[in-house]
Image: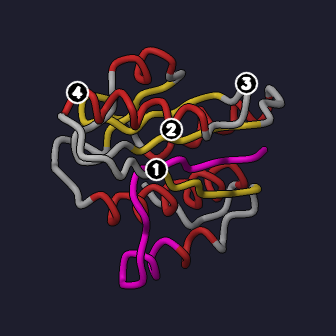
C-alpha cells in the first residue's frame, strides 16, 4: 500500500520537521509527501478552490482520499487503523491524505473524499498537525501488526 500526504505549504527545518521525519522514517508502507503552494494573492474562496485543484492533481489516480478538516469525523487511533487495515486487506493500492492551508479545504474537494477526519475541536499549527498525522500512521501500522506500541 502506498500512502501519499498531499499538503499545502512547505515543511522547513525545525522541531516540526524533526518530529515528522522521526515517524515518517519508521513507517514501512511506501510513504511520500507532495507539497503544493499557490503563490498568487487570491481571495479566500478563490484560494481554497485553487488549492483544491492543486491538491487533487497531486493525488495518485484512483486513490482513496482522506481529508483532514476541522468539521471531519472525530475518530480514535484504533478506528483509523481499522479503516487503513480494511483498505489494505481490500488491496487498495493508493491512499492520499490531504491537508489544506490555513483557510481549510474547499467543498469540491471534501465531496470527493472517502473519509473526512478531524484531530478534534482544538486548533493545531499546520506543520505540527503533519507530525501528528505521520505519528498516527505509524501507530495505525503498529495496531494492525499487533505491536504493543499503542495502549488503551
Q: CA distance from mark 4 to mark 1?
A: 18 Å
Q: CA distance from mark 2 to mark 3?
A: 14 Å
- Residue 73 lies left or right of residue 141; in this view the side is left
Residue at the spot of label 2: 55
Element class at badge 2: helix
Sequence-earlier tag: 2 or 3: 2
Residue at the spot of label 4: 45
Q: Is residue 63 above or below residue 96?
A: above
Sequence-earlier tag: 1 or 2: 1
Residue at the spot of label 3: 62
Query: Magenta part of the protein: which range?
Result: 1-20
The residue lying at 35 percent from left, 58 percent from top is 129
The image shows residue 89 at horizontal and vertical percentages of 79, 32
- Residue 133 lies left or right of residue 39; in this view the side is right
Sequence-earlier tag: 4 or 2: 4
Q: CA distance from mark 4 to mark 3?
A: 26 Å
Mark 2 or mark 3: which is in front?
A: 2
Q: Which mark is residue 7?
A: 1
Mark 4 or mark 2: which is in front?
A: 4
Asked if marks 1 and 2 touch (Cβ < 8 Å), the reply is yes
Q: Residues within 10 Å of mark 3 (few under 14, many from 20)?
A: few
Element class at badge 4: helix
Asked if marks 1 and 3 touch (Cβ < 8 Å), the reply is no
Amino acid at each position: 500500500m502506498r500512502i501519499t500526504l498531499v499538503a499545502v505549504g512547505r515543511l522547513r527545518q525545525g522541531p516540526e520537521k524533526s518530529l515528522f521525519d522521526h515517524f515518517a522514517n519508521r513507517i514501512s508502507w511506501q510513504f511520500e509527501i507532495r507539497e503544493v503552494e499557490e503563490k498568487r494573492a487570491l481571495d479566500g474562496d478563490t484560494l481554497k478552490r485553487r488549492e483544491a485543484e492543486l491538491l487533487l492533481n497531486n493525488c495518485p489516480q484512483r486513490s482513496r482520499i482522506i481529508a483532514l478538516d476541522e468539521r471531519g469525523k472525530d475518530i480514535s487511533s484504533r478506528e483509523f487503523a481499522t479503516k487503513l487495515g480494511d483498505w489494505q486487506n481490500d488491496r487498495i493500492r493508493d491512499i492520499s491524505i490531504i491537508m489544506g492551508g490555513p483557510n481549510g479545504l474547499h467543498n469540491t474537494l471534501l465531496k470527493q473524499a472517502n473519509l473526512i477526519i478531524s484531530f478534534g475541536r482544538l486548533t493545531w499549527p499546520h506543520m505540527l498537525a503533519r507530525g501528528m498525522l505521520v505519528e498516527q500512521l505509524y501507530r495505525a501500522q503498529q495496531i494492525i501488526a499487533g505491536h504493543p506500541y499503542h495502549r488503551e
